[in-house]
Amino acid sequence: MDLSKITESFTESVIREMTRIAHQHPRSINLAQGFPDFPAPESIKNAAINAIKDDINQYSITWGALSLRKAIVDKISKYNKIKFVDPNKNITVTCGSTEAMISAMKAIINPGDEIIIFEPFYENYGPDCLLSGAKPRYIQLQAPSWSLEPEGLKMLFNKKTKAIIINTPNNPTGKVYNQEELKLIADLCLDYNAIAITDEIYEHILYDNKKHISIASLSGMQDNSITINSISKTYSLTGWRVGWAIACERITNEIKKVHDFLTVGAPAPLQEAGAFALSLEDEYYQSLKDFYQKARDILFNALKNTNLRPIKPKGAYYMMTNCKEYMKRQDLKTSMDLAIHLVKDIGIVTVPGSSFYANPQDGQFQTRFCFCKKEETLQAAARKLEKIGY
Ligand code: GLN
């Protein structure tokens, strides 16, 4: 019996597999899958408990609780400078940004359409694209600056281009797209009538005074953008699965239908708590930034003293490393060999670079560390990394 040719064409997530490997090595430190090891804010947890006690326990309106949609409108107009969002016409609340992404693609794709994806990428984008029926077209950002090569991008756009995926701040590189890059992408989208699908879940995790810009706020992009976000990373609630997609009314109407038949709705009480979270004051976001800047610097300084060469991220909470010299010395052939060696011999779990590229060979000498961890976890990791040496 034939099974789906599409699902047979990709593997399970390596990021999540590394967490399972971490569980098999209980003394290892999991710096693979990006989730915090510290508690979520007390006030948000209380908001969820209160919502459950108040019996917000049945389905919400399928495209999201009104309180959360109103809070999103408020946030997106102030922080993202996106002014067109109406709570009833432009928002679909989903089970995390993961569902928002696949729903967005399913809502716009027809057979033969192409979606442009920057490499290295967050590994969901390729399978999402295939599941929606589109053909992924890849273009690489070059380490260590992860700069975007305008001519290469212009050459990829063609009449089959339906969308381009942007992830800023970026996982796994830490790149924060600047105004000029976003303007280039926006102009290409408008020229080819393509849609920028933008995953902005790390929008508050920025270093060295970097600023976040949403492509949907650029002139003319209202009808050519889908902006995706969630409460997972900003409020350290990755297991709650509350995210959303924002788009013009025509696109939103299609996303709502996909979402309705995929999951019906995101967890109702957690949406209420999400609405509360979005109302937190500026101080919360400043302290989140300060916390992660310190975490980044601890991990960077620890890696700098090894011959895994770290590239300092400008945003998000991951650090890519170039491990070519070390792999040669240890006679390790693939980035999975390296990751397994780091688990077994050093006690640290990372994500092999190959999982961020369509051609695994392109990430063969890289591995990704995450640093969304307590200071003591990162200090313990730093001590383990001393074994690697320079
Ligand atoms: N974004 C996280 C990472 O890259 C993982 C998210 C997930 O597993 N759903 O590690």
Image (spheres, rainbow, N blue to C red):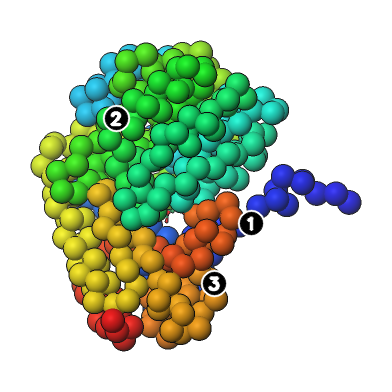
**Quadrant assignment, res 373:** bottom left
Which mark sits nearer the N-terminus, 2 or 3?
2
Determine whether, in the image, residue 359 is placed left or right of residue 16: right
Residue 207 or residue 42, whichever sits in front: 207
Whether 337 is drawn above or below 76: the answer is below
* Mark 2 lies on residue: 180
Q: Nearer the viewer, mark 1 or mark 2?
A: 2
- Cα distance in 3D space between marks 1 and 2: 35 Å
What residue lies at 40% left-to-right and 50% top-to-bottom? 142
Residue 11 - label:
1
Residue situated furthest front in the rendering: 151
Quickly name the residue at label 3.
334
Exactly how many numbered labels are in the figure? 3
Where in the figure is residue 49, as x and y percent of width and height? Answer: 31, 45
Q: Are marks 1 and 2 in contact (CB under 8 Å)?
A: no
Identify which amino acid the numbered label 2 is placed on.
Glu
